[in-house]
Image: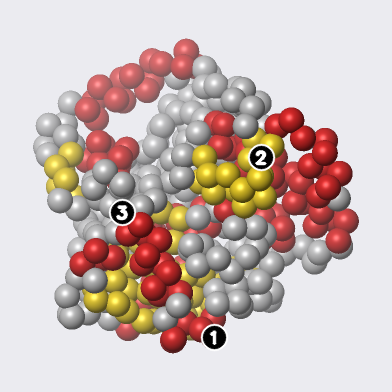
Amino acid sequence: MRDVLVSIFRNRIVATVSVAGLLFSSFVVVDATPRLVNRDTSQSAVSEDVEMDLMDADVTPYEFGGTTYKNERDFVKHARCGVDITAEQIEAIELLIEIEQAEAGKAGKLAFTGGKIPVFFHESRPTSTATVTSTRLANQISHLNTTFSGTGYTFYQVGWNYITSSTYANARQGTSDETNMKSAFYNHSSAANYRHNGALHFYLCTNPRRSDGAGLLGWATFPTSYSGSSDYRDGVVIQTGSLPGGSTTNYNQGDTATHEIGHWMGLYHTFQDGCGTGNNTTSGDRVSDTPAQASPTSGCPSSRNSCTSISGNDPIHNFMDYSYDSCLYQFTTGQDSRMDSLCTSYRTRIPTN
């Protein structure tokens, strides 16, 4: 099936390519004209401009990870999550998904409706002092089981190891810091038993950063990044202070992990592509039951509608938005279905229920 489909898309693909930091292990679309319809800014100009004026009027500096942001909204826009995908990259991912799902159907793969995901914690310590406790890790696992309840996915801890390294504790996304850190942990003797059993590798850093040095709460790889392999680069990177009971105010109940694992299982941000066409099946986050959203949420507003010409208020309580942890409590049925679909095609090593 792959050979047939590759020949169909012959003039639009190349083998194993990295596009702006996202690796597509089979092929990637190189046609620069995306199928996605760009956001129509006129649909939400009034409501979003008013909201932005109010939020940007806040002149209280926000400190995070050694960086001073203009205000908290500025922090949210730049440091809440390191997953930042362009329309072209999404087209590449979605095309790859179409082909892989066609192969999965032909192969008669058992469709996922959930699974038991083993989690291996890898802690990078800047000094010999531990940055987490067994209780906080257990609380993170408990929180994941709460936030993913109803999806059929559960989580359990299979290990915890650590390396003392200031460089790894301050690892920069997409650089040798990240690659070397993950390689060191993955080849650690205590991880050997869990390399091939569908484990989620959960990298904990005191101050994970963008490549330019600005702090980040976390980032993740997508299911398509390594095509079901046990590549050591696969997993999520999470700021230690965002675990339950951590020091990162408003983002310390464990939902950074929930958010990044959502990416790891194939979900985009709810505000992907802005208002788009209003059809989230073919644009936006590719999930039909998450209303269109022009931009990420900051704080925890009582309600928000950033796409006034499209029905539905912003999904401010959705784990794939940027609201405070205390504001988040929802994955939709459509998001659950997408996670099932992508795990069926790519995360085949996850033990099923």
Mark 3–mark 1 Cα distance, whole angstroms, equals: 28 Å
Q: In the visual, does 262 lie left or right of 161?
A: right
The quadrant of the picture occupied by the C terminus is bottom right
**Which disc number belongs to residue 297?**
none
Crowdedness of circle 1 by 10 Å Cα count: few (<14), some, many (20+)? few
Q: Amino acid at mark 1?
A: Asn
Labels 3 and 1: the sequence-earlier one? 3
**Which disc number belongs to residue 193?**
1
Mark 2 or 1, closer to the camera: 2
Q: Amino acid at mark 3?
A: Arg
Q: Amino acid at mark 2?
A: Val
Q: Of 269 and 16, which appears nearest the observer? A: 16
Residue 62 on image: x %, y % = 15, 43
Q: In the visual, does 326 lie left or right of 104?
A: left
Labels 2 and 1: the sequence-earlier one? 2
Mark 2–mark 1 Cα distance, whole angstroms, equals: 34 Å
Mark 3 or 2, closer to the camera: 2
Can residue 223 be seen here? no
Can residue 227 be seen here? yes
